[in-house]
Image (cartoon, helix red, strand yellow):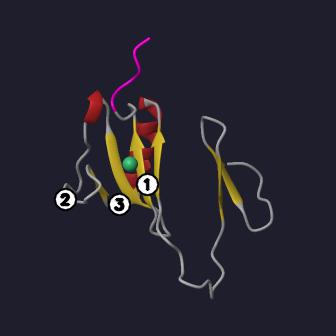
Amino acid sequence: MGDEWGPFIPLTVGNGVTFDFANVPPGIPGGIQPQHYALLVSEEEFDSAFALITARELTFWADPRMAHEGEINHNDGGRGIYFLDPAGHYMELITVPYGGWPER
Ligand SMILES: [Fe+2]
């Protein structure tokens, strides 16, 4: 996490991207529209995130249709899960890119 800036709490991820989180003021027309974010993480980062998810008893799924609750997928030989952030955005953590690592 970086320094707070105005209403934002920045969360910097490994590839130079920063998510700026803020509480949503009331009265936004249409409210928050849920979006989907997939984050490619290392095996160690996955372990750390998964430990937090389970410690906080967040519901997680192996699939985007939420059919396989409490399971981890092994798509493309990695590990992957889906869970909801506090605003209802659909977060995905994967340890291998879709389709596998590119050939060198
Ligand atoms: Fe996805």
Query: Quick check: 95 above or below 104?
Result: below
Q: Position of residue 17 (x, y in %)?
A: 64, 43
Query: Quick check: 38 above or below 29?
Result: above
Query: Quick check: 104 above or below 90?
Result: above
Q: Which residue is mark 1?
A: 91
Image quadrant in which you'd find residue 26: bottom right
Q: Return the residue found at the far bottom.
A: 27
Considering depth in this image, is 66 or 5 the residue closer to the camera? 66
What amino acid type is highlighted by mark number 3?
Glu
Q: Earlier in the sequence, mark 2 or mark 3?
A: 3
Give the residue displayed 36% in from the left and 35% down from the top: 98
> Magenta-highlighted stretch: main secondary structure?
loop
Residue stretch rendered in magenta on the structure: 99-104
Other residues around mark 3 within 10 Å, as few (<14) / some (14–19) / many (≥20): few
Q: Return the residue found at the far top.
A: 104
Query: Quick check: 8 above or below 16?
Result: below
Mark 1 secondary-structure assignment: strand
Give the residue displayed 33% in from the left and 31% down from the top: 99
Question: Is 101 covered by the magenta stretch?
Answer: yes
Q: Horizontal placement of 25 versus 5: left or right?
A: left
Q: How many marks?
A: 3
Q: Earlier in the sequence, mark 3 or mark 1?
A: 3
Q: Position of residue 41 (x, y in %)?
A: 47, 36
What amino acid type is highlighted by mark number 2?
Ala
Q: Which residue is mark 3?
A: 57
Other residues around mark 1 within 10 Å, as few (<14) / some (14–19) / many (≥20): some
Give the residue displayed 73% in from the left and 49% down from the top: 2
Q: Which residue is mark 2?
A: 67
Considering depth in this image, is 34 or 43 the residue closer to the camera? 34
Q: CA distance from mark 2 to mark 1?
A: 16 Å
Give the residue displayed 50% in from the left and 70% down from the top: 87
